Amino acid sequence: MQFAADLVIGLLAAVHVYILVLETFLWSRAVKVFGVPRELRDVKLLRVMLQNQGVYNGFLAAGLFWGLLYPEPEVGLQIKLFFCGCIAVAGLVGAATAQIRILFIQTVPALIAAVLLFLA
């Protein structure tokens, strides 16, 4: 069960690295992926905000990787649970304010990982 939990956490971290790269470095691709209307695609403030959001996603990924690699399993578990909670809440906010699909991209996998951690 521990392997399954860590696998889901690793995949969740990889998704957040992808979001980091997309929002921070691949702006032209990000606006298409996120369905930004054409008239807003050149608004500099939107670009800056997404780049900032991308950095936050990078921090979430870093936290998950930190938990996976932490040498003391008990502390690593707490780190993983904390960041899964952060991602679940961020996904809820994103689903409520931006797109409902964020719920399935962030919240559901984070909750699955947390449940698997508790079962392990």
Image: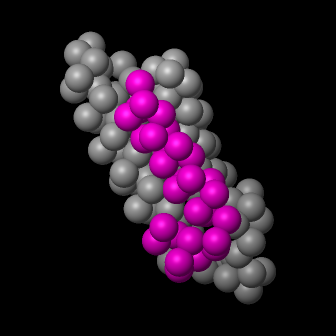
Magenta-colored stretch includes residue 101: yes
Which residue sits furthest bottom?
39
- Identify the image's colour scheme: rainbow, by chain, secondary structure or one colour: one colour
Give above or below for 7 relative to 100. Answer: above
In the picture, the quarter occupied by the C terminus is top left
Give above or below for 118 relative to 87. Answer: above
Residue drawn 64% across the image and 73% down it:
99
- Foreground residue, 37 or 77? 77
- Foreground residue, 24 or 70? 70
Residue drawn 62% across the image and 54% down it:
105
Q: Is residue 67 left or right of residue 29?
A: left
Q: Position of residue 6 (x, y in %)?
A: 49, 25
- Prevalent SS, magenta region: helix
- Foreground residue, 119 or 26? 119
Q: Is residue 81 left or right of residue 6?
A: left
Q: Position of residue 21 (x, y in %)?
A: 59, 45
Examine the image and state in which quarter residue 78 appears: top left
Which residue sits furthest top?
71
Examine the image and state in which quarter residue 95 appears: bottom right
Magenta stretch bounds = 92-120
Which residue sits furthest front?
119
Residue 54: tell me if it is visible: no
Q: Is residue 46 left or right of residue 71?
A: right
Residue 105: tell me if it is visible: yes
Q: Position of residue 102 (x, y in %)?
A: 61, 63
Magenta-colored stretch includes residue 35: no
Give above or below for 89 relative to 93. Answer: above
Residue drawn 35% across the image and 44% down it:
83
